[in-house]
Image: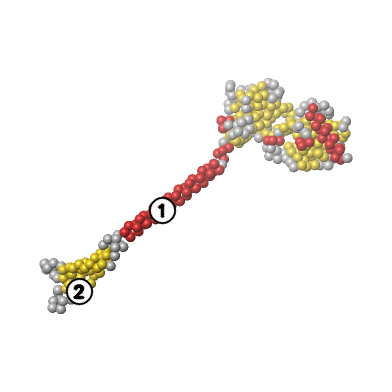
Amino acid sequence: MEVSHTLICFFFLFSLQDGSTGLVSARLPVYSGIEGDDVRFKCSFPSYRSRKFFCKEPCRQKDILIETTDAPAQRGRYSSDDKDGGFFVTISQLTKSDSGRYRCAAVTSLTEALYEDIEIIVVDAMLDGGPSAEKTIDARTGGNITVRCNIIHYRADKYFCKEECKKGDNLVETISKSDQENGRYRIRYTQIIPTGYFLYVSIDQLTQSDSGWYRCGLGRPDSKDLYERFRLIVTDALTTSPKTTEQPETTKGVILYVFLTLVVLVIVSSLSVLVFCRKRICKDKEPHVETLCASAPEAEDDPSQHTYSEITFVSVGSSHSGFSECVIYSVPRVEASSDEPPLYSTVNNPQ
């Protein structure tokens, strides 16, 4: 029975999209909150209704955020409670994506139901204190901002301008109560009784050139009518993390440096081995020379007359010829003044 009743409620909520059933408020209530804060509002139907729903349009089954009876309920950032004879809903930690239209519904049967549509606008700042209560808003390129301006006294003219708001500085101006757009700039007017009059001014697709001072108000910019003022600072989102973009290039440079170093080392090592091998081959091809030196017996008659013999074996021809020539030099050890030539003999020693 519980499942069947729930399905009936789903079909009923789906039928409300066409506005063919139920009671709709003549004026759409608008609630606003700063991003990151909470917003709480009251759905205007009695809390004793047996089953209550809270959904975001288009309010299909997957769009239902809260489904409850008389007991308080909570689902993620959404919660509800019955106090002071009303049904209250709270959305915590607002984000820009929470902006949009919602629906409260109370169902007892297929023939009896009440619902109410509301709108939530998530803003970057609320200006409620006149020109002296200036605020600074930081934003990133490509993003958007929405600011709520609270105006106490009503004027037909509505404007949104930049800097000194002289002639030509108006971004959007209108005398209509409907929303007005001019390119990336937009004005939305709402009246909250007895709070006052609200202007919601927006800028989409921000660029760094959008930085500066802005005014929003009712009346004429060049008059003494009260207005709200805020300062916008737009910075490039890419400049917030320069190390992230440079890190891949640095890593690539290190890898390339290591690779080139290894290539140079391999080339140098190869050349060293090649030079060593060529020297070894050339050394093996040189003639083999063997020298043997022996001192001759000293002369007994004259100690100053000493001779010595030098025997040199020289290989002749290739190493396989088996022939060598022995040359014996006999050199007398005499004083430097001696003119006697050295004696030598040659001995051939076939092998």
Q: Residue at 75% across / 34% down in the picture?
A: 56
Callout 2 crowding tier (Cα within 10 Å): few <14, some 14–19, many ≥20: some
Camera sees residue 44 = no
Quarter of the view holding residue 201: top right
Quarter of the view holding residue 330: bottom left
The secondary element bearing badge 2 is classed as loop
Mark linked to residue 143: none
The secondary element bearing badge 1 is classed as helix
Mark linked to residue 270: 1
Q: Nearer the viewer, mark 1 or mark 2?
A: 2
Q: Name the residue under label 2.
A: 296
- Which quarter of the figure is the N terminus placed in? top right
Indicate the colouring scheme. Answer: secondary structure
Callout 1 crowding tier (Cα within 10 Å): few <14, some 14–19, many ≥20: few
Residues at marks 1 and 2, CA–CA distance in whole angstroms? 52 Å
Q: In x, y percent, where is residue 113?
A: 85, 32
Tell me which numbered mark, 1 or 2, is placed earlier along the sequence.
Answer: 1
Q: Which amino acid does label 2 sit on?
A: Ala
Query: Would residue 134 be found to the left or right of residue 288 on screen?
Result: right
Q: Residue at 38% across / 54% down in the picture?
A: 274
Q: What residue type is labelled 1?
A: Ser
Query: Would residue 87 be found to the left or right of residue 155 on screen?
Result: right
Q: In x, y percent, where is residue 109?
A: 88, 34
Q: Residue at 68% across / 29% down in the picture?
A: 200
Q: Nearer the viewer, residue 167 or 146?
A: 146
